[in-house]
């Protein structure tokens, strides 16, 4: 990896070295402090991929007590232009968001992100406009149960690209076909198998190993759980990184949190740049990064969710249930 890290020299010169992890193999750089300060020092068109899950502004322990939906919009209006500036032409922007919840009212954050990016696009050259390629639905089986609305069990990943000539490694993320024995029924290929031997395109609804991707969220006994209250699982960034970047590319997460994107970048042989404001989470991310570089990481295998055994006690309906 050392031979392809020449781009790091800029960061060594312009970022405060006392606030950066610079590991021996030079694969990762982590900034402690306001990520906007980090972004201001990154050269334009320098990062192949930006992937993150930003704060939802719902007064979590790492958010301002005055946070609300207006805070979310204002923060993104300041932040997204810088993120787009540092993204390479042909690079990918993956923004994973859910809903801002105010009592029983929900506000779709992906709507606000898309609207803000559309405004930014008005000032960009044609070949640098940010275009939405997929609105990926990530669904999970567990979470808080609502009492005045249906329980939320999905979030959204917006995949944008900068321009039209972009990286898309479909073969890296193909999934098994539901009907692998299906054949062409007419034409010159009649009778031949119609599917790709490597599998099919996994679609934009992540739920099942065969088509829709169901990825458990990080709760309680999940092997990746840290003290961070809102982790996303490594399966999400790993799939996105494999599909939208090549080995040796720079992946950036401006809201590092527990370091999931960083670990995912390292184990897929990409470089990582990120920032984290909270010292506690910075330390968690630093330790996870160091372990990953040494080949030590505790992640949930990206395999289908185990279906319940109907004979287990926990799956049996109690006699008093209707």
Image: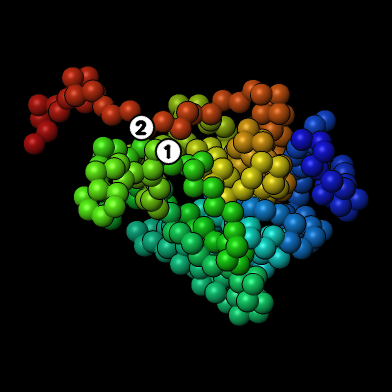
State whether residue 158 appears in this view.
Answer: yes
Question: Which residue is outermost to the front?
Answer: 188
Nearest the eye: 159 or 119: 159
Nearest the eye: 306 or 243: 243
Of labels 2 and 1, the one closer to you: 1
Q: Quadrant of the C terminus?
A: top left
Cβ atoms at labels 2 and 1 below 8 Å apart: no
Q: Quadrant of the N terminus?
A: top right
User: Residue 11 in the image: x percent, y percent?
Assistant: 84, 50
Q: Residue at x 80, y 60 (%)?
A: 43
Question: Which residue is outermost to the top?
Answer: 312
Kindly state the secondary structure of the residue where label 2 is placed.
loop
Q: Residue at x 76, y 63 (%)?
A: 44
User: Residue 177 in the image: x percent, y percent?
Assistant: 32, 40
User: Residue 166 in the image: x percent, y percent?
Assistant: 59, 59
**Residue 195 left/right relative to 170:** left
Closer to the N terminus: mark 2 or mark 1?
A: 1
Structural crowding at the residue carrying mark 2, measured as other residues with C-alpha within 10 Å and reported as few (<14), some (14–19) or many (≥20): some
How many marks on residues? 2
Nearest the eye: 67 or 270: 270
Name the residue carrying label 1. 198
Checking the image for residue 305, the label placed there is 2
- Seen in the picture, residue 314 relative to 46 is either above or below; the reply is above
Spatial CA span between label 2 and label 1: 22 Å
Question: Which residue is outermost to the right?
Answer: 13
- Seen in the picture, residue 224 relative to 106 is either above or below; the reply is above
Q: Residue at x 66, y 41 (%)?
A: 247
């Amino acid at each position: 990896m050392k031979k392809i890290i020449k781009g790091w020299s800029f960061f060594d010169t312009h970022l405060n070295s006392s606030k950066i992890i610079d590991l021996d193999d030079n694969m990762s750089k982590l900034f402690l402090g306001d990520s906007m300060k980090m972004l201001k020092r990154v050269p334009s068109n320098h990062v192949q991929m930006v992937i993150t899950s930003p704060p939802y502004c719902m007064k979590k322990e790492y958010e301002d007590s005055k946070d609300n939906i207006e805070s979310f919009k204002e923060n993104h209006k300041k932040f997204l232009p810088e993120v787009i500036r540092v993204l390479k032409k042909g690079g990918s922007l993956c923004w994973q968001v859910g809903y801002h919840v105010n009592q029983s009212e929900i506000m779709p954050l992906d709507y606000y992100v898309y609207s803000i990016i559309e405004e930014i696009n008005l000032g960009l050259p044609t070949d640098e406009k940010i275009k939405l390629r997929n609105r990926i639905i990530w669904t999970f089986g567990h979470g808080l149960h609502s009492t005045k609305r249906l329980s939320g069990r999905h979030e959204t990943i917006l995949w944008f690209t900068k321009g039209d000539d972009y990286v898309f490694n479909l073969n890296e993320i193909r999934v098994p076909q539901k009907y692998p024995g299906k054949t062409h029924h007419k034409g010159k290929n009649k009778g031949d198998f119609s599917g790709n031997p490597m599998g099919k395109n996994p679609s934009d609804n992540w739920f099942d190993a065969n088509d829709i991707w169901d990825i458990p969220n990080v709760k309680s006994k999940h092997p990746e759980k840290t003290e961070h209250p809102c982790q996303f699982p490594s399966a999400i960034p790993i799939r996105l990184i494999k599909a939208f970047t090549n080995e040796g590319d720079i992946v950036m997460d401006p809201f590092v949190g527990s370091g999931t994107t960083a670990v995912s970048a390292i184990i897929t042989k990409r470089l990582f740049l990120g920032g984290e404001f909270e010292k506690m989470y910075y330390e968690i991310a630093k330790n996870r990064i160091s372990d990953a570089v040494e080949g030590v990481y505790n992640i949930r295998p990206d395999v289908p969710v185990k279906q319940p055994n109907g004979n287990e006690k926990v799956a049996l309906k109690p006699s008093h249930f209707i």
